[in-house]
Image: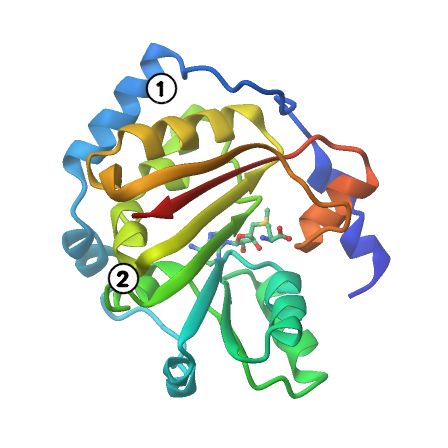
Amino acid sequence: MNDSEKYDDIDIRVEDPVTFPLGTPDDDVIKALQKAWARQDLNTYVEKRWTGAYVPPFPDTFWEYDWRACDIGSGFGRFGWVESQKHPTRAYLSIDKGKRRGGGMLRRYEEKDVPNVFPLHGNAIPILANMPHASLNLITLFYPNPWWPKKHQKKRWSYHPLLPHLFDLLVPGGCLMLCANERFYLQEWLWTLQHHPAAHCMKEEYVGPIQVSEGRSDFEVKFIHHNVSCGEIRFRKE
Ligand SMILES: C[S@@+](CC[C@H](N)C(=O)[O-])C[C@H]1O[C@@H](n2cnc3c(N)ncnc32)[C@H](O)[C@@H]1O
């Protein structure tokens, strides 16, 4: 990866800078969230949307590790790459569907043979939908695409039919972490974790500014470099 990829100015457009406290989403947002949750059914969605779609083969050796993490929308895969080398007894799955980032991640991971990092270039939805409950100790979502326009809001993770399955995928004590550089995204996510009917097992652990000076993902590196304020929300499964 070259520096122009890391510091591409287009990617750091911020519509709604992060400040705390996050407050409560507007009524129309709450209504839209509740409407989406009431209709959600992951099996129907996966059958309708993903039957016959390409899903990359899942690495069996991932299951040989007792502690497992998944970075969803991993981009170039910095998080899995760095953490896997710090913690050789833990398994790190990095999934990205993008041609440039997902492909770039595969090339980055091929450079060195690190056995406990597992890159998947494909869509996380069918991969995770097929994963059994209590598979993961950590799920990270670093700077997901905010999908600003209202017509796209259903694409945000707070509205997605996969969301309740993410809670199921965690082992007790497992952590779900999301970072964003848009206040509205964090506000919506926090409200979701506090109110989604399937999230009663999730306990708030941290809501505030990111607490790192070195970026954990490539977007975070870029945001820190450009002094973009970023927030982090962590919930732990009880
Ligand atoms: C804004 S980028 C952030 C990348 C990385 N997390 C980081 O912080 O550097 C969002 C990434 O999520 C990926 N993505 C979005 N939806 C996805 C999905 N359903 N499955 C896999 N990757 C996804 C996109 O391809 C894109 O690379």
Residue closer to the observer: 192 or 144: 192
Mark 2: which secondary structure? helix
> What residue sits 32% from the left and 53% below the top?
166
**Looking at numbered disc 1 in the image, what kind of residue is underneath it?**
Val
* Residue 143, position as x, y percentages in the image: 57, 44
The residue that label 1 is drawn on is 29
State the image coordinates of residue 190 (x, y, percent, origin top left). 42, 30
Q: Please tell me which residue is depicted at 23% across the width and 38% down the height of the picture.
A: 200
Quarter of the image with the N terminus in it: bottom right
Q: Quickly name the residue at label 2.
A: 129
Q: Is mark 2 within 8 Å of ligand 1?
A: no
Residue at image location 56% in from the left, 59% down from the top: 74
* Marks 1 & 2, CB-CB < 8 Å contact: no
Q: Amino acid at mark 2?
A: Ala
Q: Callout 1: helix, strand or loop? A: helix
Of the image marks 1 and 2, the number of the one nearer the N terminus? 1
